[in-house]
Image (tube, rainbow, N blue to C red):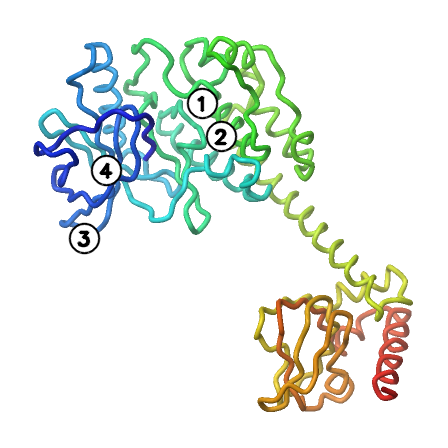
Amino acid sequence: MDSGGKSKPVVVLNRPEPRRIGKYVVARELGRGSTSTVYLCHDAYRGRDVAVKLYHSDQDLSPEEAEVRRRLFFNEAQMAGMLDHPNILPILDAGELDDARYIVMEFIPGARPLSDYTEAEHLLPVNKCVEVAFKCARALAYAHRQGVIHRDIKPGNILLTESGDVRLVDFGVARTAIGGLDKVRGLIGSPSYMAPEQLGKHIATRETDLYALGVVLYELLTGKRPFYGDSLERLKQQVMYASPVPVHRLRDDVPPELERIVNRALEKQPARRYRSALDFAADLSQAFQQAARLRQQTVEQERFSQLRHLDFFRDFAYPDIWELLNAGSWETYREGEALVREGDLDESFFILVSGRVNIQRGQTVVGKLREGSCFGEAGYLEGQQRDSSIFADEEVQALRLTATAIERCSTACQLRFMRQFLRMILTRLSS
């Protein structure tokens, strides 16, 4: 669904904007580029919305430009029904109407190009970047098995759906086993994402696509492209001979293994890159698992830091705090959500880590508790019914502990917990 530039769209049925494109009723324009305009249309026959890419008229073009435009269309049209993969946007139909040519694609409401996530203030989390690249690599592995080389992998040609899934789009400049655009003069694709051999106008291969995916991953992680140039010639010099700024200098939460993967994808020599998209995907899968482990470690470290500053844990040794953190359940509650309800039979004991809660009997608020407070001791000791409800007054985080969980802790940890638990009860009784 990518369409670049600002050329005037084809006039269908002698109107400034088409009302119909073949059997498809036009609803509105979605995007416009140098070779085509994309419209949201309705397919009345199948009762669904589709995206229709309408190629611009050839009337004002030179014969050479018109031939390129014609080849772009037929190249993409032959993909209809050829590529069937969950991470490739399907081409549903293609047709010609007078001097107009169009491609019909699946319409995904709310989908946004990855280019929306390549600015420093809008970068995706590292694990999401890895997931996106992994799905793109799997899609490319499938396309390569069908004899298709995409040749224009870039953020604008990768859609991220509202559910977080990925769709690879725009096979207009693809090279296929049964023909392609190799006889068209000039560069085919987007220079900033081209491998050295592609800029040198050699035939694109699988490794060429994987290099471009490496550039996309670098940009998703850092918000910058690995190579820049204020002219095509200077860009070519950078791509051919320069080394990119190391990823960790631009983003410090990128695991070393992931940086190694990016560096391999960006190798100058195709033979030193990944030889297949499946190999690329396999390494990304391992990096995703590593990133998930690091992310969990970071979360646990942050939670530990929050606990050790609370009065309840003032006399605890660090290993005891870790033990209780692992034994308990870390829970988050939205404003107005109940932590406990009056009449419930529950043995849980809560330590309020952040936020405020209201103590409520019936419909009456009888007290408030703040960060560092504890509640639920009667239920914890005797399993009694709750005599009041506790509602979050704002977003709240709490460590929930049960007698069963505490019994699984070490003896030293249990003793420290009970000592502090009894001190808390005595303080509450005396006040």
The Cα–Cα distance between marks 3 and 1, rounded to whole angstroms, is 38 Å
- Reading the chain from its start, which is encountered first: label 3 or label 4? 3
- Reading the chain from its start, which is encountered first: label 1 or label 2? 1
> Where is mark 1, residue-wise?
206
> Where is mark 4, residue-wise?
52
The Cα–Cα distance between marks 1 and 2, rounded to whole angstroms, is 8 Å
In this rendering, the count of numbered labels is: 4
> Where is mark 2, residue-wise?
277
Proximity of marks 1 and 2: CB atoms separated by less than 8 Å: yes
Please say if 69 is above or below 390: above
> Where is mark 3, residue-wise?
47
- Badge 2: residue crowd in 10 Å (few <14, some 14–19, many ≥20): many
**Secondary structure at numbered mark 4:** strand
Please say if 31 is above or below 34: below
Label 2 amino acid? Ala
What quarter of the picture does the N terminus occupy? top left
**Secondary structure at numbered mark 3:** loop
